Image (cartoon, helix red, strand yellow):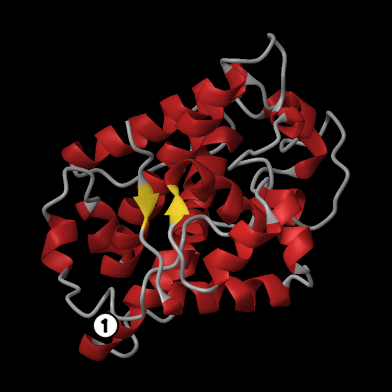
C-alpha cells in the first residue's frame, strides 16, 4: 500500500523556508525536530511532496496548525458554504456578525480534530500520561501552561464533550453561554484555532463591508462580558486554589447562573 502524500509546490516550499528562518532554525534544527533527515527537509523547502504521516511533525516544528495553502485558496470564497453547515451558529451571527460565526465553524472543526489527535495519542500511553509527555501534541502549547500536567485523557475527553455540545447547540439557534471556566476556555480556543484561516478570509469579507469584520476576535469576550480568561491564563499569573480560574474550579458553574 503506497504512502499518501501532500503535493508540494514552490510556494509552499518558500513559506516553509521563511517560517524556519523566522523561528531561527537551521535546516538541521528543523529536520531534527520534525524527525526527518536534512535532505528530506531540504526537499520540502524546494517544493517537494510531504508524506502525510510527516505533516503533523512538520507543522509542530514550524508552530503551524496546518500547512498553508496557496494565496489563491480563498478566491472562490462563498459565505453560503459556511451558512449551509450544520454547525453554523446563526444566533452568534445575528448578535456578533458573520465573521464571528465563520470563526466558530472553522475553529471548532480544527479544535475538534486537534483534541481527537491528542486523545488518540494518549490512549496509547499509560494511564495518567499528560500532554507535556507527548512528543507531538496539538494542544499543549494552547492550554494554560500552569496546569500542563493536569491535561490527561479524562481532561481532554471532557473538553471534547463541551465542544461537541456547543456544536450541537447551533441547531437550536440559541446563543452560546459559558457557565464554567472550561466552557469559556473551549470558546476561546475555538477563536484562537480559527485565526490562521480567518486571516485569509477577512479580505473577502471586508470587500463587502469594510468595518463589519474589524474586531472579529472579540466575540468570545463579548459573550463572557470580560477578558479574565486572558488575564489569568495567558498573562503570567500564578493562580492559587482560591482563584476561580484555578484548575480545581474549572468544572464548577460560576458565570451567568441563576442561584
Q: At x 63% / y 73%, what residue is drawn?
A: 19
Location of residue 215 with respect to 120 vertically, above or below: below
In front: 244, or 211? 211
Q: Which quadrant does the N terminus fall into?
A: top left
On screen, residue 169 versus residue 166, left or right, reads left
On screen, residue 20 versus residue 72, left or right, reads right
Q: Position of residue 180 (x, y in %)?
A: 55, 33
In front: 66, or 167? 66
Q: Quadrant of residue 35?
A: top right
Q: Position of residue 251 (x, y in %)?
A: 60, 24
On screen, residue 40 versus residue 69, left or right, reads right
In front: 64, or 186? 64
> In this view of the protein, can residue 179 be seen by the observer?
no
Q: At x 51% / y 29%, what residue is drawn?
A: 159
Neighbourhood count class around disc 1 (C-alpha, 10 Å): few under 14, some 14–19, many 20 upward: some
SS assignment at label 1: helix
Q: Position of residue 28 (x, y in %)?
A: 77, 61
The residue tagged 1 is 204
In front: 237, or 195? 195
Total marks drawn? 1
Amino acid at each position: 500500500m503506497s504512502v499518501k502524500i501532500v503535493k508540494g509546490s514552490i510556494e509552499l516550499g518558500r513559506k516553509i523556508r521563511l517560517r524556519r528562518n523566522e523561528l531561527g532554525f537551521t535546516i538541521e534544527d528543523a529536520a531534527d525536530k520534525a524527525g526527518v533527515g536534512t535532505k528530506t527537509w531540504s526537499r520540502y523547502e524546494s517544493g517537494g511532496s510531504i508524506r502525510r504521516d510527516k505533516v503533523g511533525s512538520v507543522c509542530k516544528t514550524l508552530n503551524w496548525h496546518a500547512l498553508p495553502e496557496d494565496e489563491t485558496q480563498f478566491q472562490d470564497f462563498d459565505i453560503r458554504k459556511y451558512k449551509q453547515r450544520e454547525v453554523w451558529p446563526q444566533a452568534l451571527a445575528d448578535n456578533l456578525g458573520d465573521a464571528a460565526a465563520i470563526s466558530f465553524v472553522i475553529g471548532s472543526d480544527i479544535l475538534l480534530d486537534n483534541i481527537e489527535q491528542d486523545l488518540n495519542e494518549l490512549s496509547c500511553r499509560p494511564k495518567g500520561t499528560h500532554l507535556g509527555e507527548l512528543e507531538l501534541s496539538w494542544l499543549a502549547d494552547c492550554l494554560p501552561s500552569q496546569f500542563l500536567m493536569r491535561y490527561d485523557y479524562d481532561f481532554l475527553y471532557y473538553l471534547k464533550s463541551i465542544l461537541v455540545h456547543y456544536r450541537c447547540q447551533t441547531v437550536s439557534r440559541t446563543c452560546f453561554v459559558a457557565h464554567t471556566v472550561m466552557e469559556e476556555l473551549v470558546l476561546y480556543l475555538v477563536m484562537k484555532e480559527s485565526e490562521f484561516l480567518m486571516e485569509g478570509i477577512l479580505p473577502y469579507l471586508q470587500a463587502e463591508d469594510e468595518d463589519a469584520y474589524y474586531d472579529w476576535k472579540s466575540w468570545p469576550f463579548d459573550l463572557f462580558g470580560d477578558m479574565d480568561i486572558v488575564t489569568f491564563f495567558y498573562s503570567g499569573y500564578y493562580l492559587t486554589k482560591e482563584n476561580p480560574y484555578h484548575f480545581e474550579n474549572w468544572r464548577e458553574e460560576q458565570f451567568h447562573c441563576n442561584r
